[in-house]
Image (cartoon, coloured by chain):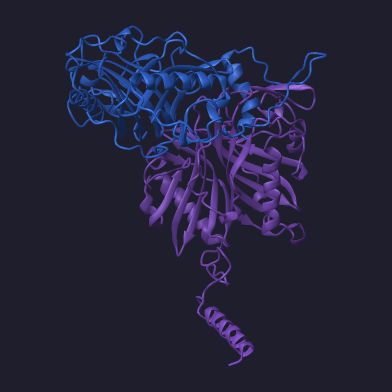
Amino acid sequence: MTSLLKTFTRHAMLAGAALLGLAAMPANAQLPGQPSAVLKIDCDRACLIGFVRQYMGALAKQDPKAVAIAPNARFTENNVMIPVGKGLWRSVNKVADTGLEVADPETGNAAWFGVVWEHDQPAYYAMRIHVTRGRIDEIETVVHRKTGLPAPFGPIDKVAHDPEFQQVLAPTERRSRERLIAVAQSYFNTVERNDGAVFAPFTEDCARLENGISTTAPPPGGGGGNAADIATGCRNQFLLGIYYINKRVRERRFPIVDTERGVVVASGFFDHDNSFDRYPINNGGEMKTALKWPNSITLLEAFRVKDSQIQRIEVVFTYVPYAMHNPWAVGRQYSELGQ
Amino acid sequence: MRARLATALGAILVATAGSALAQAPTAAPAGQKPILRPFGSVPLMVPPSSDAPRDCDDACLKGLAQQYMDALVKQDGSKLPWADRVRYAENGVTIMVSDGTWATATAKGASPLIVADAKAGKAVWIGSVDEHGQPGFYAIELTARGGRIVSVQATIRRQQGRPPFGDPIAFTHDPAFSATVAKGKETPRAIMSGLVQAYFEAQGGKSKAPAFGKGCVLIENGVPMTGNLPAAKGESGDCATSFSRGLFGEFEAIRRRIVAYDDARGLVVVSGVRDLPGATTSFTGSDGKGYKSEADYPRSFGFVTVFKIEGNAIARVESIATELPYLMPPPWQEPRGPRP
C-alpha cells in the first residue's frame, strides 16, 4: 500500500471508529439537566396546589402520614437537613387557612407563604415542595419566629397576600421563564451592596411584604418601624442606597416560575458582614446598622412580574449563622448562581 | 431584604431598648466628608510556609492562642504561622479567615481562660471580644501541628437573642479555674473524662449525675443557671440541684467531644451542640414536678464548656453557648478527641 493510501485508510478507519462511537452513545441522552426531550407533566398546577394544601393540612395535625411523602424525601428547616416529622412538625399546632400559593408544573415545584403557630405562638413560614410520581420528595422551609433579633414581624391578624399574585396575565404581559428569572436576578443585583444603582425594573405601584408587613408603605399614621419610614415604594429605597449593608446575595436559586402569572419564587441568603456599623446614603444622611456582628438571613421570596416589571414581592426570611450554606444549593439546577 | 430591613427595623429594637441611636438617616455634619465605604473583605493571602515544623508544647500552644487573638483584634492574620491548608469556622459555619469576626473584632477581654493540651495539639481561649463597641462572649478551639495553625473553630455569643446573656466585660472566670493541683495529686484523665461524660449523660436523662464538689455552680454566658434557665434572683446556680431535680428534661441530645485536658489544673474543655426539640411547653423533672420548657420552638445551642475537676468531683462549670438552627451539623468531623 502506498504511504498516501495508508494515510487515507488510517483516516477512514478513525472516522469510522468515531461514527461507531456516536452510535454507541446512550439513546436517551438529552440536554444537561433534562431527563427527556419531552417533559411529561404528571402533576399540573391544580395537582401541585393540591399537594401544597395537603402538606399544610398534615402539618397542622403533626401527621406526615396524612400526605404522600416519599420514604427518601429530603426536608430542610432553615437550611438544616432534618428527618420529616421533626422540627416544626413537632411544635406546630395550627396553620393559617390561606396562604400565597405558587406552582410550576414544568419543574414539579410549588410553594406556600403564610403564618403557622407553634404552641399558639405565631411564626412566618414559607415552604417549597417538589412532587415526583405522586409523592413529595423535597421539602424546603424557612421559619421566622419572634426571637428578639431585629426583623419585621407583621401583625398576624392583618396579613394579606396580594391577589395580584394569582391573576393570570394577558399574553402580552407575560414573559419567558428565562426573562422572569433575569428580572428577579436584577432585584438581587440591586440589593447587593446597594449604592443607588437600580438594575431592577419596578412598576410605579410596586409593593413588598416582608414577614407579613409592608416595607414599602407605612401604615396609616406612620411608625411602621421599617424602611417604609425612610422612603416609600420599591425603587426609591434603592435609589437612596439604604440597603448597602447587604454584602452578598448568595446561593441564589429560582426553583419556581409561573409564566402565566409572572411569578418567580427564589431562594438565597443576604450576607451582612458588618465590617462597618454605619454608612452614608445618597441624600447626605447616614444609616447605622442595627446589628454589630456578622449575620446572614435565609429567604424564600416571591416576585410578581408584569410586563417585565416587578409589581409585587412577598418574602419570608429569618436569621441564620453568617455565611451558612443551603443544602439545596448544589449546582446549576434552577438557574443557581455561584458563591 | 431583611437585615437591610434590619437597619430601619433597628427602629423597632432601638425604640424598645431606649437607645440613643438615631435610626432614621441623619445629615452628616457640615463640612465632614462622607465615611468611606469599605468594599468588603479580601481573602487572607500568605506565602507558603518555608521554615521547618517544630514541636509545640503547652506553653507554645498558649502562645499561639494569644498570638491568634492579638492578630484577630488587629484584623490582620498575615503574620500568624498558618499551615498550608487551614480550616476556619464561626458558630458552625466555615468561612475564610479575614471574614466574619476577623472583620468586626477590635478588642478582647483582658483576662481570658486559656487551656492548652500538647497531647491533643489544641489550645482553647475563652473570654470576650468587642465588635463595634459591643462586647460578646467568645471562645476559640485552635488546633496546631508542628507549630502551625491547621484549624480554628470560634463560638461567639452576642448580646441580641434570648437569655442567658450576662456582662462579658464584668464577667471574670472563677479563680478555681486557675488554681493548680498539687504535684502528684492530679486527677487522671480517665477519671476526668468519666465525670464529664457522666455529666452530659445525666443531662440527657440517661444516667445518674456525677459527683459535684461543694459550691459547684453552673455558669452560662456569665449567668448562674438553674437547669436550662437563668437562676432566679438569689439562687446561685448550684450544680447538684439542677441535676437532682432533673431540670434538663427538655434536652433531646447533647452532641459533644472532649477538646482538651489541662492536667495541672484539672480542667476539661468540651465542645458540642445540644438539641431542644421544642415539642412541649413543659416537662416533668425527676422530682415529679412540672417545669416550663425553655425552648418553645425547635432549636440547638452550640457550646464550649470548661469543667474544673477536684479529686473525683466536678467543682465548677462554665459555658459559652449560642443559638443555632435546630440540628445544625458541625462544620467538619474532628478526629476523635484526646484520649484520657
The picture places residue A19, in percent across and down from the top left corner, at: 57, 82
Q: Quadrant of residue A273?
A: top right
Q: Decide: is B257 above or below A336.
A: above
Identity of the residue drawn at 60% across and 83% down:
A11
Give the color of chain A as drawn.
purple
The picture places residue A88, in percent across and down from the top left corner, at: 42, 40
The picture places residue A12, in percent across and down from the top left corner, at: 59, 86
In the rendered image, the quadrant that contains the N terminus of chain A is: bottom right
The picture places residue B283, in percent across and down from the top left corner, at: 28, 28
Q: In this view of the protein, can residue B294 be seen by the observer?
A: no
Question: Left or right: B339 with respect to A215?
Answer: left
Q: Residue placed farthest to the front in the image?
A: A2
Question: Left or right: A225 with respect to B322?
Answer: right
Q: Residue placed farthest to the right in the image?
A: B31
Identity of the residue drawn at 20% across and 32% down:
B206
Question: Left or right: A21 with respect to B127?
Answer: right
The chain that appears blue in the image is B
Figure label count: 0
In the rendered image, the quadrant that contains the C terminus of chain A is: top right
Residue closest to the eye, B325 or B58? B58
